[in-house]
Image (cartoon, rainbow, N blue to C red):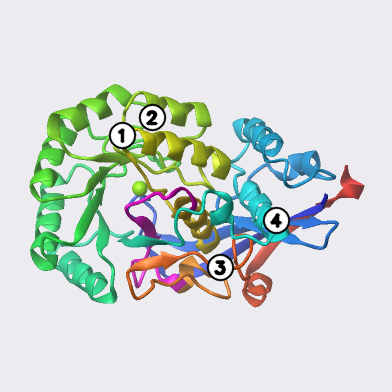
Amino acid sequence: MKIIAIELTNLRLPLDPPFPAAWDPEPRTSFDATLVEIHTDDGLVGVGSGDAMVGFAEHAHRFIGEDPASIARHVRTLETISYHVGRCWPFEAALWDLIGQASSQPVSVLFGGATDRVPAYASCGTRREPAAMAEVALARQSEGFRAMKLRVERDHHEQGIATVTAVREAVGSDFGIMVDMNQAWRMPGDIEPATDLPGARRMADALRELGVLWMEEPLPEALHGDLRSLRETTGMRVSGGEMIRSFPELLDTVLDDALDVYQPDVVLAGGMHRARTVAEVVMARNRWFTPHTWSNGLGLLANLHVTAGVGGGPFLEFPFDPPGWTIERRDFLLAEPIALAADGTVVVPDRPGLGAVIDRDAVAALRTGGIRIGAEDV
Ligand SMILES: [Mg+2]
């Protein structure tokens, strides 16, 4: 099997009403996605999405004529590309989709086949007042979720603690609560300083008392010593890693024992093949592996396959926070959106590859541009 063409399609879904993402100072009025499609001489088409694939087109010729299954070669090539331009990991997801289709196996089976479903946590994207957040948490609980992640405002820790307290009182002690501090990285142009270690420590003490499962990205991602100290002195589980750019940096984070919970997003931070290695090391050290999944439905699917394949968990992130972030918005690329099963899990599609069914009408309607690179461009 050989790659004969690569297609990138840029899509834009208008968001009306806008989505006020907690980690972005600017409310979002549109949601952009890039669909990657790899065509082979066997007539198979592999799909992937997640990062915007900025700068990939000028390097696409490096893959034309190659066997999609040469994963080690492709991952190393993508690493050289990602050093200079965007995070082009959706291309690797599309390769795995092809390998799965060609071998008639779901990608999760190729990644270890540990399970075919993972318990989901509702990942909230918006901040709210305590009473409103408690109401939202009760709604998630009644929908079948067994855990939920909340956002709190940077430098408003008292308010954040009040919110977590209200949610805990509403949902009871058996419901998992995670709290994302979003201090590891910044959106472009956001130059506000991060929370410092003493501030993070006070917050961690309070969250531990409220039975919070993990505290996410409490400090900048490179401060391994501070992160480890935070974990050790407070006894609060600390998570992170969603945007760590390279495999060596991610590996250093693990070897420095900076975190309890590792969350590399396979379509944003290092890709699927590397995530599997990290997951095996993390789990061998009795830490948790559970990726970040905030891109779109196809990106969520790639993370689901890796998590189920390696047996990660205990929960998988399920971005869902209506009305700002609905399944329809998140999965607008998919003809079959990813739903929560009755048992509170997300089930891996049993079709070969990633098992995605692309909504071609949505792609046609929302297309803003794109490019196709074929043998004639090499
Ligand atoms: Mg996060």
Residue 63 image-quadrant placement = top right
Q: What residue appears at the point 38 percent right and 56 percent down from the top-left corner?
A: 316
The residue that mark 4 highlights is: 98
Q: Identify whether 361 is placed above or below 286.
A: below
Above or below, 329 relative to 269: below
In the picture of the structure, the residue carrying the numbered disc 1 is 259
- Nearer the observer: mark 3 or 4; the answer is 3
- Span shown in magenta: 309-327
User: Label 1 vs label 3: CA separation?
Assistant: 33 Å
* Of the image marks 4 and 2, the number of the one nearer the N terminus: 4
- Quarter holding the C terminus is top right
What is the x, y in percent for residue 247? 52, 31
Numbered disc in front, either 1 or 3: 3
Say what amino acid the circle numbered 4 marks.
Leu
Q: Position of residue 152 (x, y in %)?
A: 22, 51
Disc 4 to disc 2, C-alpha distance: 30 Å
Q: Position of residue 81 (x, y in %)?
A: 66, 34
The amino acid sitting under disc 1 is Leu
Circles 1 and 2: CB atoms closer than 8 Å: yes
Instruction: Kindly report the distance in space between the C-alpha atoms of the residues bearing marks 1 and 2.
Output: 7 Å
Residue occupying image coordinates x 18% and y 29%:
232
Q: Main secondary structure of the magenta part?
A: loop
Residue 181 seen in this snapshot: yes
Instruction: Name the amino acid type tagged 3.
Output: Asp
Closer to the N terminus: mark 1 or mark 2? 2
Q: Earlier in the sequence, mark 3 or mark 4?
A: 4
Read off the residue under disc 2.
254
Label 1–label 4 contact, CB within 8 A: no
The residue that label 3 is drawn on is: 350
Is the residue marked 1 within 8 Å of ligand 1, measured from its CB?
no
Query: Which of labels 1 and 4 is toward the front?
Result: 4
